Image: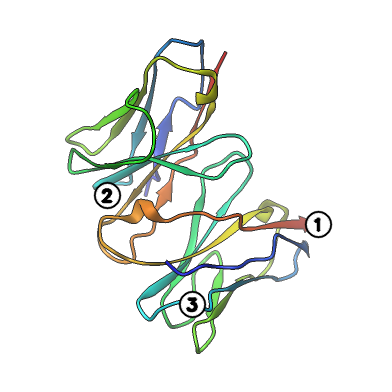
Amino acid sequence: EAGVTQSPTHLIKTRGQQATLRCSPISGHTSVYWYQQALGLGLQFLLWYDEGEERNRGNFPPRFSGRQFPNYSSELNVNALELEDSALYLCASSWELPPGELFFGEGSRLTVL
Amino acid sequence: DAKTTQPPSMDCAEGRAANLPCNHSTISGNEYVYWYRQIHSQGPQYIIHGLKNNETNEMASLIITEDRKSSTLILPHATLRDTAVYYCIVRVYSGGSNYKLTFGKGTLLTVNP
């Protein structure tokens, strides 16, 4: 069974540009979660999508947005990139039944110059 | 969610069993114990979970004390690739809020040759 896959693995952008990150959940999982992990810091919850709808978002500005497609894959967009957006962006998926463990992808490393 | 306490770091010799403790003295009856690990610069990896009974899978064993106030993750034959930060998380499954699975500081396990 394939795990959560993310692309690209690495992405380098300059300030003001836009970045798009992609995630494919485990087959059968309908929920997708996005997290940001800046260097040396813990995971910060960004967004939760389920059945194509945004269900919740963390404390991030509106320039962080995304969507979930009918096949449950997801896309994270970061507009007007700032230097502090440099981080590992992690996607996770889960069942909606107990105990709801999260399965993470390997992440996309975004570097903003 | 119940608070957990883990030692900040532990060492283990390669080939020996690694026993990682976690205290969760305020755990309530419907809270699960989850274990994840994060190898440097990779996404967190789900290891195992339990509610009341001891659990074993291909990666590890989880021993939960009878009063559920503490647990131990056991890696039976640690390898160098098991060097990672291990997170013990206790929370209620509350359908659709899996993103709230928050990762504390965890235990840095270093497996030495």
Camera-nearest label, 3 or 2: 3
For marks 3 and 1 on the same chain, the one whose residue lies earlier in the sequence: 3
- On the same chain, marks 3 and 1? The answer is yes
For label 2, the residue is A29
Q: Chain of mark 2?
A: A
Q: In the drawing, what numbered circle is on residue B1? A: none
In this rendered view, identify the residue nearer to me: B76 or A29. A29
For label 3, the residue is B26
Determine which quarter of the picture holds residue B94. Answer: bottom left
For label 1, the residue is B112
Q: Is residue A20 above or below residue A43?
A: above
- On the same chain, marks 3 and 2? The answer is no
- The residue type indicated by label 2 comes to His
- Colour convention of the picture: rainbow
C-alpha span from label 3 to label 1: 34 Å
- The residue type indicated by label 1 comes to Asn
Q: Chain of mark 1?
A: B
In this rendered view, identify the residue nearer to me: B12 or A16. A16
In this rendered view, identify the residue nearer to me: A39 or A73. A39
Q: Position of residue A23 (x, y in %)?
A: 36, 34
Q: Position of residue A38 (x, y in %)?
A: 56, 34
> The C terminus of chain A lies in which quarter of the figure?
top right
Query: Residue reaching furthest bottom?
Result: B66
The reply, left or right, for residue B46 in relation to residue B87 is: left
